[in-house]
Amino acid sequence: MFIPFFLIWVIFNGQLTAEIAAFGVVIAGVMYWFLCRFLNYSPRYDLFLWRKAPLLAQYMLTLVWEILKANLSVFRLIYTAEYELEPAVVHFKTDLRTTFARVLLANSITLTPGTITVALSGSEYTVHCLDKELAEGISSSVFVKLLKKIET
C-alpha cells in the first residue's frame, strides 16, 4: 500500500520534483504506518496481494465478463414479452475460508445484474434473483472456483 499512496501523492501534485518525492515518501510512510497500527493491516497482506495478483486480475476480468453476460440476459428477460419473470430468493453455503473471499463473492453477486446479495452470515448467503433462471448454479459459479484458487 505504500507504493499506491506514493503514486497518488505524485499524481495529485501533477509533477515530480525532489521535494515532492521527499514529502510523498514521508506522507506515504505515515499513511502506511496508520493502516498497520490502527486498521489491523499488515505487510503480510501486501505480500498476499502481490503473490495473488495474477489470479486477482483473472478474477476481475471474469467479473467484467460475467457482468456483460448478465446484462444481456437481464435485457432479454425484461424485453421479451413472452416470458414472465419468476423472482426467487436463494440460500446457499460455500466452503470459502476467508472473510476476504466471502465478501468478494457477495459483492460480485451484487454487481452482477439480476442478482443481489441480501444477507451474508458466516458462509451462508441469501441472494435475490430477478428470475429463477439466474439462480441456477450460483453456489458453484466461476466466482467460487476462482476464489478457492485465490485462497490456496
Image (cartoon, rainbow, N blue to C red):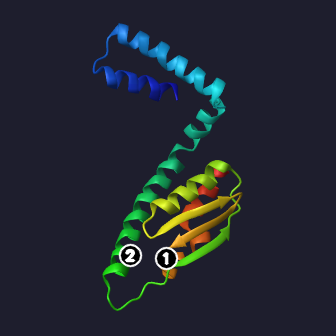
Q: Secondary structure at mark 1?
A: helix
Q: Looking at this view, is 144 or 122 the one in front?
A: 122
Residue at image location 51% in from the left, 25% down from the top: 2
58 shown above or below 90: above
Q: Looking at this view, is 63 or 127 the one in front?
A: 127
In this view, the residue farthest toward the left is 14
Amino acid of disc 2:
Ser
In the shown orientation, is residue 62 left or right of residue 100?
left
Q: Which residue is mark 1?
A: 134
Q: Which mark is residue 73?
A: 2
Q: Can residue 82 be spotted in the picture? A: yes
Sequence-wise, the earlier of marks 1 and 2 is: 2
Quadrant in the rendering for residue 15: top left
Q: Are marks 1 and 2 in contact (CB under 8 Å)?
A: yes
In the shown orientation, is residue 73 left or right of residue 108?
left
Categorize mark 1 by other alpha carbons within 10 Å: few (<14), some (14-19), many (20+).
some
Residue at image location 68% in from the left, 58% down from the top: 96
Residue 151: x and y in percent read 65, 51
19 shown above or below 151: above
Amino acid of disc 1:
Leu
Q: Looking at this view, is 60 or 5 the one in front?
A: 5
Find the distance from the CA under tag 1 to the CA under tag 2: 9 Å
Residue at image location 57% in from the left, 39% down from the top: 49
Residue 123: x and y in percent read 70, 60
Q: How many numbered discs, if any?
A: 2
Q: Secondary structure at mark 2?
A: helix
Residue 103: x and y in percent read 60, 53
Categorize mark 2 by other alpha carbons within 10 Å: few (<14), some (14-19), many (20+).
some
Q: Can residue 150 be spotted in the picture? A: no
